[in-house]
Structure formats: structure tokens, C-alpha cells
Image (cartoon, helix red, strand yellow):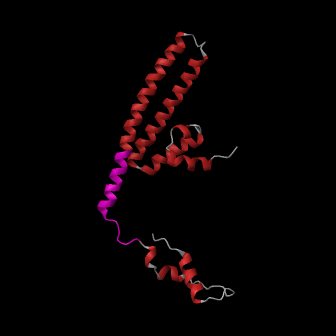
Amino acid sequence: MAIYNIFDYYEKEIQENPSHTAKPSIDPRAFATNHIDENYIQGTASSKDHFFSALAARFFFLLLLIADLLWGIYAIASFVVKLSLHLLFFGRVNFLKRAVARSWLSIKRALVCAISLLVAIFSPALGIMFSCMYFLMYDKTGVDEVVPSSLRDQFKELFPSK
């Protein structure tokens, strides 16, 4: 679908009719019939470009999934060690209680990211939507820790300011 710059037509109308008191008459049919060459990208992308782009995106999602699985294994191992220490001291050490809670949260984050990355391999938009939905609804503090900085500002716009 082509994107039209409606201001190009307005500027042409103003140049043709320099009096500022007259309201420009823009014909809506001009958008369907007239094309300004600078609004179009010269040459269309080939099917090879589309295929390579889709393949590269899925490959990088696969790499992220592998990294996330490694993170999940580390989070589970850390959780087991901290939980065993917590049980060894009969739950009386507050530091271990907080450490177990943080490790459990890390396991949940790794699981959500793994599910969303697995879905993103087949449908990138749906996988990203799953992860965004989780972090927006259930784990707003996880945005600072897990979400890349390039997307973090967009998340912050969705949160109500305090």
C-alpha cells in the first residue's frame, strides 16, 4: 500500500494560488490518480529479499531462544541451590528468602521469554505480543531488567506516570 503525503498536494495548491485568503480546493480523486514520484521507493524488493529477511529474523529468534534456554537452566540451578540453603536454615534467613523469591521470578521470566521466542520463530508479531502482554500485565519491573533498551521507552509510555 502506497503512503501518500497529502501536504505535497496542499503545497502545490498554495503555489498555484498564492492568495492566503482563498481556501485551497483539494480534490480527493487526485490521491487515487496522481502519483508524485518522490513518494515511492524506486524499485521493488525481490522475493529473495523477503525470503532472506524472514529467514534472518527467524534465525535470530532461534539464537535468542537458545540463549534464553541457557538462562533458564542457570535460573533453575540457582533456584535449587538457594531453596536448599533456605530449607537448611529452616527459612529463618531473610536474605535467602528474598533470594529464593528473585530466583523464582527469574524462572518465570525465562519461561515466558522461551514461550514467546518459540512462537516468534513461526510468527514474530504474535511472539512479541505474548512477551509484551506478560510484561505489561504481570511484571512491570521486568521491563527494566529483560526488555531491550530500544523497546524500553515504548513500554514506559504505556505505564501511568506516578
In the picture, the quarter occupied by the N terminus is bottom left
Q: Position of residue 157 (x, y in %)?
A: 61, 50
Q: Position of residue 31 (x, y in %)?
A: 51, 79
Q: Which residues are magenta?
A: 41-60
Looking at the rendered structure, the number of numbered marks drawn on it comes to 0
Q: Is residue 64 above or below residue 19?
A: above
Residue visible at 59% across and 41% down in the picture = 137
Q: Is residue 55 inside the magenta stretch?
A: yes
Q: Position of residue 39 (x, y in %)?
A: 46, 74
Q: Is residue 103 above or below residue 126?
A: above
Residue visible at 46% across and 79% down in the picture = 36
In the depicted view, which residue is nearer to us: 152 or 55? 152
Q: Main secondary structure of the magenta part?
A: helix
Residue 46 is left or right of residue 86, and the answer is: left
Quarter holding residue 119: top left
Q: Is residue 14 above or below residue 90?
A: below
Q: Position of residue 66 (x, y in %)?
A: 37, 37
In the picture, the quarter occupied by the C terminus is top right
Residue 22 is left or right of residue 113, and the answer is: right
Q: Is residue 150 inside the magenta stretch?
A: no
Residue visible at 51% across and 18% down in the picture = 83
Q: Is residue 87 above or below residue 65?
A: above
Toward the left, the furthest residue is 48
In the depicted view, which residue is nearer to us: 1 or 146? 146
Residue visible at 57% across and 81% down in the picture = 11
